[in-house]
Image (cartoon, rainbow, N blue to C red):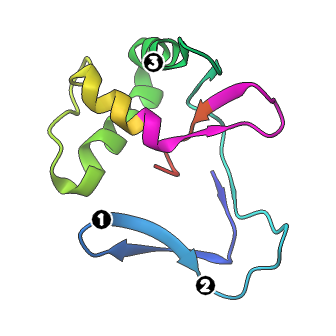
């Protein structure tokens, strides 16, 4: 993960952690760069495809996703071997997956942003 010096990670009361501008940001400035944890073509099966990819992750990749699940507002207990209930993981994917500008028609999930 690359994070610009223009951002700082801060506690957001009642919401967990988030980034805020540490100094003025110029339009077009690169703020974050991260490899996608999982990705799928946009369409009716994108959620199922991304869930399957998340379940297939092992090692450090699985630990990074478990960290996201466990840290969400300090109230999640879903960080377990099978990533908890699909409904909880699906909610995280829906709220933190982004359309890819470099690859139109694709969605991707980035744990560090979540």
Disc 1: which residue? 15
Disc 3: which residue? 57
Q: Nearer the viewer, mark 1 or mark 2?
A: 1
Local secondary structure at mark 1? loop
- Magenta-span inclusion, residue 94: yes
- 110 over 71 or under it: above or below: above
Residue 22 in the image, given as x and y percentages of width and height: 60, 84
Quadrant of res 90? top left
Q: Nearer the viewer, mark 2 or mark 3?
A: 2
Residue 78 in the image, given as x and y percentages of width and height: 20, 33
For the residues bearing labels 1 and 3, Cβ distance under 8 angstroms = no
Residue depicted at x 68% and y 37%? 99
Q: Residue furthest bottom?
A: 23
Q: Is residue 95 left or right of residue 42?
A: left
Q: Is residue 92 left or right of residue 3?
A: left
Task: Confirm whether residue 39 shows in the render.
Answer: yes
Give the mark, 1 or 3, whose residue is nearer the N terminus.
1
Question: Where does the magenta region start and end?
Answer: 93-107
**Residue 102 got which mark?**
none
- 33 over 78 or under it: above or below: below
How many numbered marks are there?
3
In the foreground, 41 or 110: 41
Quadrant of res 28? bottom right
**Residue 22 got which mark?**
2
């Amino acid at each position: 993960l690359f994070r610009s010096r223009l951002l700082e990670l801060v506690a957001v009361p009642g919401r967990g952690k988030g980034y805020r501008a540490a100094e003025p940001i110029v339009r077009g400035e690169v703020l974050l760069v991260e490899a996608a944890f999982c990705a799928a073509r946009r369409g009716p099966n994108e959620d199922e495809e991304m869930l399957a990819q998340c379940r297939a992750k092992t090692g450090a990749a699985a630990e990074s996703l478990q960290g996201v699940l466990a840290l969400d507002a300090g109230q999640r207990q879903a960080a377990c071997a099978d990533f908890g209930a699909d409904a909880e993981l699906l909610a995280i994917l829906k709220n933190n997956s982004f359309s890819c500008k470099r690859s139109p028609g694709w969605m991707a999930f980035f744990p560090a942003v979540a």
